[in-house]
Amino acid sequence: MTHMDIELARGDITTWTVDAIVNAANHTLLGGGGVDGAIHRAGGRAILQECRLLRADRYADGLPTGEAVATTAGKLPAHWVIHTVGPTWAKTKDKSGLLRACYRNSLAVADEISATTIAFPLISAGVYRWPKEDAIVQALTTLRDTPTSVSTATLVLYDEATHRLAEQVAARLD
Ligand code: AR6
């Protein structure tokens, strides 16, 4: 187990050249909006076909929140897509354990498939409405605290404001 570098970047994760990119998917694994839609659009039908097989076999009831599973990446520059399902934000219920599980289980899947470079979107911070600052705290602290053989994890922020916020949070956590 070596030390993992954690990097912040701004951009579209579908363009990332890494061993694995993580998809903020939903239980169905059959696509949706946000980064999920972008990954399936850019990756082509091969990803969807593998997702359908996973649904027919291992995940007949859907992928549970917090778990992660890999498919190949179709036409994307990455080799793998690790699909995980973030929790929806709820004011009255602390689901941060499930959000942290997404990062932890995605790293565990990366280890299983021997991916050493991985890029994450900010899971749950879009359609699932998790407040961005706390989503960044959960992401960075979980990545920092999870033992893994991954050498570099990049948190890819889609817009400049979120990227700036992530830089500020990272400086504070240092
Ligand atoms: N590259 C990087 N980040 C992106 C991209 C991209 N191409 N597109 C969006 N983001 P979301 P969630 C950012 O909504 O909240 C889907 O319908 C976005 O700005 O993609 O976990 C699924 O099927 C935000 O900061 O995921 C589920 O039903 C972050 O990615 C549901 O949305 C996550 O936003 C999952 O919702």
Image (cartoon, rainbow, N blue to C red):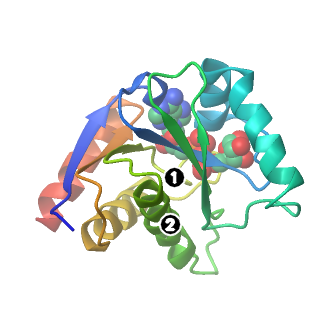
Residue 133 visible, this orientation: yes
Q: Quadrant of residue 142?
A: bottom left
Q: Which marked residue is nearer to the observer: mark 2 or mark 1? A: 2
Work out whether 66 lies above or below 93: above
**Residue at horizontal 19%, vertical 56%?**
170
Label 2, on which residue? 105
Q: In which quarter of the image is residue 103?
A: bottom left
Local secondary structure at mark 1: loop
Q: How far apart are marks 2 and 1 (CA)?
A: 13 Å
Horizontal arrangement in the rendering, residue 45 relative to residue 22 (left or right): right
Q: Which amino acid does label 2 sit on?
A: Asn
Figure label count:
2
Decide which of 144, 138 is in the foreground and name it.
144
Indicate which disc residue 123 carries: 1
Few, some or many residues within 10 Å of mark 1 (<14, 14–19, 20+): many
Q: Residue 59, percent across and down?
A: 80, 61
Horizontal arrangement in the rendering, residue 166 relative to residue 174 (left or right): right
Decide which of 171, 151 is in the foreground and name it.
151
The answer to whether the beta carbon of the residue marked 2 is less than 8 Å from any atom of ligand 1 is: no
Q: Quadrant of residue 119?
A: top left
Q: Where does ligand 1 appear, by image quarter?
A: top right
Quadrant location of the C terminus in the rendered image? bottom left
Earlier sequence position, callout 2 versus callout 1? 2
Indicate which disc residue 68 carries: none
Decide which of 172, 20 is in the foreground and name it.
20
Work out whether 150 lies above or below 121: below
Local secondary structure at mark 2: helix
Q: Residue 106, percent across and down?
A: 48, 59
**Residue at horizontal 79%, vertical 33%?**
49
